[in-house]
Amino acid sequence: MWESTPFADMVREAAAADGVTYRRLAESAIDPQTGQGLTHNSLWKIANGEPVKIAPWIVRAVAAAIGRDLREVQAAAAEQYIGLTAGDPFDATTPSAAVVVAHVPGLRPADMPKVEELLRNWASGSVRN
């Protein structure tokens, strides 16, 4: 199993709720873009760290099944499968722009001064497209 399993943890937590089974989760594990669905076996494999061929539609289907925000589920999958943490460590997101910084796990904002400088310059209008 991987060192960090936030994607698997989300599926396990959803399946741990009262009366929820992997079969029941699979009923709503349908990608809203493609209509493709996950089987209960695939959900079990994800939850237990078994090898699965990950694809964007699978992440969207998992988000639908567990009722979590797609970006949150995508970030968890990225951390688990490629070792990157994604988020807004500087609270720079605005109503008109989402800021997502991908970095290795464990970095704090203080560890990324150049990124913070770039975001502050962007926010002030100093950076042009």
Image: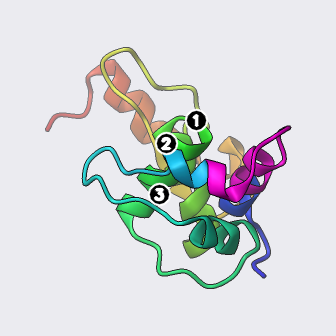
Q: Secondary structure at mark 3?
A: helix
Q: Amino acid at mark 2?
A: Ala
Circle 2 sits on which residue?
64
Q: Is residue 12 magenta?
A: yes
Camera-side residue of 84 and 50: 50
Amino acid at circle 3: Val
Give the residue at mark 3: 59
Residue at 55% of width from left, 36% of height from top? 88
Relative image position of residue 61 (x, y in whole percent):
45, 52
Residue 128 location, quadrant: top left
Mark 2 lies on a secondary structure that is helix
**Are there few (<14), some (14-19), or many (20+) residues within 10 Å of tag 3?**
many
Q: Earlier in the sequence, mark 3 or mark 1?
A: 3
Residue holding disc 1:
67
Residues under numbered marks 2 and 1 in contact, where contact means CB atoms less than 8 Å apart: yes
Residue 114 visible from this viewpoint: no
Q: Residue at x 33, y 30 (%)?
A: 122
**Quarter of the image containing the N terminus?**
bottom right
Measure the alpha-carbon separation of dots 3 and 1: 12 Å
Residue at the image position 48 percent from the left and 63 percent from the top: 38
Badge 1 amino acid: Gly
